[in-house]
Amino acid sequence: MTPVSSSAPHRPAEASAQEGQLTFPSTFLWGSATAAYQIEGAAAEDGRTPSIWDTFSHTPGKTYQGDTGDVATDHYHRFREDVALMAELGLKAYRFSISWPRVQPTGRGPAVERGLDFYRALVDELLAAGIEPVATLYHWDLPQDLEDLGGWTVRETAERFGEYAALAARALGDKVKFWTTLNEPWCSAFLGYGSGVHAPGRTDPADALRAAHHLNLAHGRAVAALRAELPADAKVSVTLNLHQVRALTGSEADLDAARRIDAVGNRVFTGPILEGGYPADLRADTAHLVDWDTLVQPGDEAVIGAPIDVLGINYYSPTLVSAPAEGEELAPGEAAKNDAHGASDHSPWPGSEQVVFHLPPGELTAMNWAIDPSGLYDLITDVSRRHPGLPLMITENGAAFEDTVNAEGEVLDPRRIDYVHRHLAAVHRAIADGADVRGYFLWSLLDNFEWSYGYSRRFGAVYVDYATQLRIPKASARWYARTVRSNSIPQVDSPS
Ligand code: BGP
């Protein structure tokens, strides 16, 4: 049995192709996404205290040119202008995240009303503009106070997260219908505690695995809290950056490398969340690092496996792996240097540090991520086959390119349009082939603080001039607005 409850019936036939246009299901939720620390700024206002990303970005050498989210896109003060932009683009939904240290500064105790007021005002503004708010509880900004007590490596943090979820739901649950517990817990655990390229910048493979379990447990605790606080028609989800793992060759060794990365990249989350528990092969691959029988306490997997209504998937690029060459022993981090998750001397793949990552074929974005929409098609159809009846939502997809403002004051970004167009065609094809995809959220609404890359990478549909905070919708924003309005895209020659 798939632990999913779904109300609306799925009608794949609704995805149609007519007169050179690919039309999406009539209820398809078109949106755009952001995250609190990447856009809000106002880092020390109205009671907000530092998160691990404040500490990390203020630590010399951790981000590009020492960039921080202190000001970011100043969305905290400009959210009305930003919602007006979304309305102008005709967005049906907006996925944002709530900053934990803004609403519960130390990660425990009562909420700070001024912090909650910001989200109440944002949600009211969205609803007044006819835009569906989609709230994520955690997009990587753990209160620093909790990190000082051990962060995600300790179980206690999962308990704190459950309480925070309840408090956020109590404040916003009458107006927000779509809730996501965690965004990309893989990054929180394995980049945060394994390779150290993300906050808090720790580099211990065992800690990364402990963090993964405690993030799963936090998700489970939050699902329970959300169910208790929210009306019955609320939708609860988690967003995973599932890796579309491909083996370099069909050799047994390469297929096993792909299996390993699928285990520690994907099934470490989908196992307990959707399939009843941690996969035996993951436990075996990492048994020398953690004692799973102590880490996972009786009842944990049942908590983590509580039914969800939707699975959020973030996709940017496929993952290509092989076994190391016969007899070759690579330095830590070396094998992973082409894994598209940042450079480090420490691997974010505990127990599978010798798996070699290759740059997949295809043009590259400014992140050096290969462009391959077939990865999105394969990912959606694989997940659908594995979890029939589980509604999916593409909660992030998009690309960074080197955007510039031309003499006319415009930002022309044909490569982004092409990227989004071809990925939407892949989503359409997956729906036509039977997948239940309920919506698509373009990453990102605005250019913003791209984590360790600082402001050097632009993912926005809207260009931000950081000196003046001027917003300029790029050509891709106009293209996306037309897509949302028509609920369709022009047919593409090679669909994906
Ligand atoms: C999001 C971030 C984005 C972008 C993306 C990368 O959640 O907020 O800014 O970095 O993830 O995803 P991936 O995990 O595939 O690297």
Image (spheres, rainbow, N blue to C red):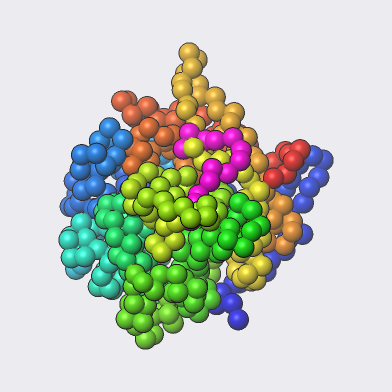
Give the prevailing secondary structure in the magenta stretch: loop
The residue sitting at the bottom extreme is 298
| Towards the viewer: 290 or 396 | 290
Please identify the quadrant where the N terminus is shown: bottom right
Question: Which residue is painted at 20% across and 56% down in the image?
Answer: 144
For the C terminus, the image quarter is top right
Residue found farthest to the front: 327
Q: Nearer the viewer, residue 274 or 320?
A: 320
Residue 191, horizontal then vertical, whole percent: 36, 54
487 lies above or below 304: above
Task: Name the residue at 37% across, 58% down.
Answer: 190
How many labels, in total? 0
The residue drawn where x is 59% and y is 77% is: 2
Specify whether 487 is left or right of 357: right
Residue 245 drawn at (x, y percent): 57, 56
Image side of residue 383 versus residue 163, left or right = right
Residue drawn at the location 50% of the way across and 21% of the way down: 410
Q: Nearer the viewer, residue 54 or 444?
A: 54
Q: Is 166 displayed left or right of 411 in the figure? A: left
Considering every residue shown, the one lying at the far top of the view is: 407
Res 154 quadrant in image: bottom left
Magenta span of residues: 355-367
Q: Position of residue 477 (x, y in %)?
A: 54, 34
- Is there any visible trace of residue 328 in the rendered image? yes
Please check the rendered image and state whether residue 307 is part of the magenta-colored stretch, yes or no: no
Q: Position of residue 357 (x, y in %)?
A: 50, 49
Q: Is residue 439 visible?
A: no
